[in-house]
Image (cartoon, rainbow, N blue to C red):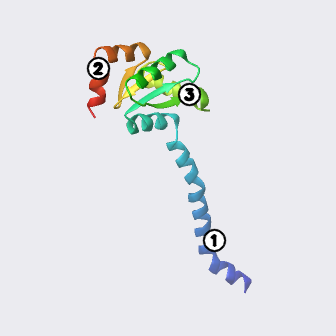
Amino acid sequence: MPELCIERRRPFLIAAVACLLVIGNAPGKALASNSPAAFVENVIYSNRIVMFSKSYCPYCSRAKRIFRQLNEEPFVVELDLRDDGSKIQDVLLEMVGRRTVPQVFANRNHVGGLDDLEAAVSDGKLKQLLDSA
């Protein structure tokens, strides 16, 4: 008689184990989508102005000052304050060929570092990029 009970429950046990296996794998898939590359892409595509920065960097401070003077507020990612900051810099190296900071993006377009930002402000390219949204 106990064997009959086990036989009746077997399909339910198999289904329960299958559900646990599927649910158990779900966090792995969620973590994969939170990769540094996905983060960088999401930040760039979700914000009008993005600056990858380090909180202690004098060049980054100057870039922030430029945006304040323009009454613009970039979305700033302080790489030194993130556990994955170095990995994000690796992603930037692959994307734009540089690991240095600041790295500025305007309406999904790479502007560059501080010198590039200053040049883009001077020649009107930054305004053009910002107005193109």
Mark 3, other Cα within 10 Å: few <14 / some 14–19 / many ≥20: some
Q: Position of residue 44 (x, y in %)?
A: 41, 34
The reply to whether callout 1 and callout 3 are in contact (CB within 8 Å) is: no
In terms of image quadrants, where is residue 83?
top right
- Identify which residue is drawn at 44% across, 36% down: 43
Residue 13 circle label: 1
Q: Is residue 112 above or below residue 75?
A: above
Secondary element at tag 2: helix
- Identify which amino acid the numbered label 3 is placed on: Leu
**Between marks 1 and 2, how big is the CA–CA gap?**
64 Å
Q: Position of residue 52 (x, y in %)?
A: 48, 26
Q: Position of residue 2 (x, y in %)?
A: 73, 83
Secondary element at tag 1: helix
Secondary element at tag 3: helix
Q: Position of residue 16 (x, y in %)?
A: 61, 68
Task: Tell me the residue that label 2 is attached to.
Answer: 125
- Identify which residue is drawn at 59% across, 20% down: 56
In the image, which is nearer the foreground, mark 3 or mark 2? 2
The reply to whether callout 3 and callout 2 are in contact (CB within 8 Å) is: no
- Identify which amino acid the numbered label 1 is placed on: Leu
**Between marks 3 and 2, how big is the CA–CA gap?**
26 Å
- Identify which amino acid the numbered label 2 is placed on: Lys
In terms of image quadrants, where is residue 51?
top left
Residue 79 circle label: 3
Among the two numbered marks 3 and 2 on one chain, the one whose residue lies closer to the N terminus: 3
Q: Quadrant of the N terminus?
A: bottom right
Q: Quadrant of the C terminus?
A: top left
Q: Nearer the viewer, residue 41 or 101?
A: 101
